[in-house]
Amino acid sequence: MTRTPIADYALLSDRHSAALVSRHGSVDWLCLPRFDSPSVFGAILDDSAGRWSIRPPGTRKVSRRYLDGTMVLETTFETATGTLVLTDAMVVGEHPDVHRLGASAPHVLARRAACTRGAVRVELRYAPRSEYGQVVPLLCEIPGGVNSRGGPDRLTMSTPVALDLAGHEAAATVAMEEGARLCFALQRSDACAEAPPVWDQARITEAIETTARAWRRWAEAHQRYDGPYRDMVALSGRVLHALSYQPTGAIVAAPTTSLPESPEGERNWDYRFSWIRDASFTMEALWVAACPDEAGDFLNFMTTAAASYEPQGALQIMFGVGCEHDLTERELPHLRGWQDSRPVRVGNAAWRQPQVDVYGELLAAVHLLSDQIGPLDRESRAFLVSLADAAAGQWREPDHGIWEIRGDPRHYLYSKLMCWVALDRALDLAPRLDAAERTGPWRTAREEVREAILRQGWDEGMGAYTQAFGSSVLDASALMMPIVGFAPAHDPRVRATIGAIAEHLTDEDGLVYRYRAADGLAGEEGPFLMCTFWLAHAQALAGWRDRARETFARAAAFANDVGLMSEEVCPRTRQLLGNFPQAFSHIGLVNAAWAIDQAEREARGGHRKRLDL
């Protein structure tokens, strides 16, 4: 059973797929050629599901970092006799357009081991296991490498050292002296294609260096934020870019599946898909931490994927990275799961849930980028008008809410709030949509939604806006009321809600829970980092700058040694939980940092910057 802490992993990405590498130099997760492809290495979910490790035995100290401005990982192992530096990269290739990082990615994982002091022994273990560990491939030694075949993948591992092939694994122990370097690469092709060719040492070295240069070029052209927490914002921007699928602009919620929200519980979901809900929050985060090109790519993906929407139906809430609609969920019973957390799932049944908040999120994203989108064709205008009409017609209906609770539909406040956002943004966009005749009904519906929220969303006993109409349960999503502009943060009821969440919905470290009520699933849920950043964001809008900074610091402190965050923090062990790294946590960090920056500018007598994309 794998017990490697989630925080021990670092992310590699070529903007098509992703790998997770542990502090011990083990690639325990790799899906090729897409984020949502079956894994080639899956040891993070079961020791038998494959890994590729390079490490010196007897390590006394390990330190890691991303090379400046890149997603190229450098791990330094200190031993009694010497130092080994391991450099890992998903090769992005070269492309003349700096905005198209990864467009020429060859789908190669490159690794370089260098002895920089004394002498070290290096142990290498290579055990590919395609289709989430169900395929134990045949390994065959070839000049300069090892081929494997079996199942849908043909793999070539390029290696400068001879490997011992036994038990469907390849292994070697190599003595290295100071100045020595060994380079390795893993390439994949389909089962029906030719085996990938071996790469020599010079080609692997150049691929790693080219990848570092390409990431730096992208960062230099895109990352100009100069406010508080600059380094964290810049890294989060690169993480979000690393979680984007270059061919379409989709951003996955996380590159993993079934890393649990609750150890040994059933809250294990596949996050390798793109949610409409993320859209408007992602737009703002990408503007701060990257540039409008990336935000525009994501918006184009969302509108393309959702464009089959019919007004009489419900807009699908999430899509595959290639715009796929069918994300049917199934379980993989042969995998034990991280720390015995079963079931392991692929696909996500939430794609079938009706969630009316998505109309607001998509229209808010279009509104935010309206100046960059250019002229809208007739079909696009009709599609966006239909979203506003759907919000006007469906806001009274119960749904499953932002947290995709797998129980009976309810009248969730957040869903009503985002229907208000849909109508509010549609009214502003009406001239661009040629929808002047719709503004009367939209304005009427917007005021009806607003009145319902103000009347039914407030709970006198709790002294706050709550999770659902008629409920006394606090919910962190109420923090979005000032963030989306429904009511100013200095409104007495909004300030009371922010205060109630800070007082009653936090743990001993000040981290914020989504909610604290039974939801029909087993297991104890931990506080959410994204929700904690929401609290910091709302506090900044309310003018509580010191509180906002304190809240921000509490959440940011749970980033791992290379700055990555998962979804939750275990309430007992304080370790990171949930799929990793979590895009929404990094989105929350960026947007909260921006809000704090704007609040401090205003306090100094300046003006808030507008999101001029």
Image: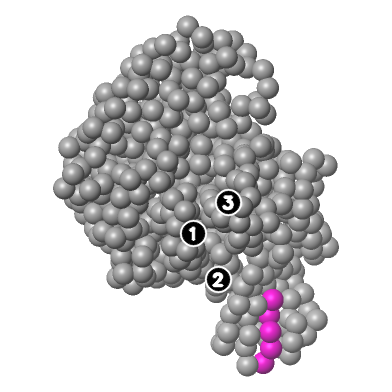
Q: Quadrant of residue 600?
A: bottom right
Q: Which residue is mark 2?
A: 561
Per the model, the C-alpha gap separating discs 3 and 2 is 33 Å
185 sits to left or right of 366: right
Q: Is residue 318 above or below residue 68?
A: above
Residue located 45% across and 38% down the image: 484
Residue 507 position within the rendered picture, expressed as x and y whole percent measured from the top left: 30, 65
Residue at the extreme top of the image, as rendered = 437
| Circle 2 SS class | loop
| Circle 3 SS class | helix
Query: What's the coloring here?
Result: one colour
On residue 602, which mark appears?
Answer: 3
Q: Which residue is mark 1?
A: 545
Residue 512 position within the rendered picture, expressed as x and y whole percent measured from the top left: 35, 58
Mark 2 crowdedness (10 Å alpha carbons): few <14, some 14-19, many ≥20: some
The question of residue 524 being in magenta is answered with no
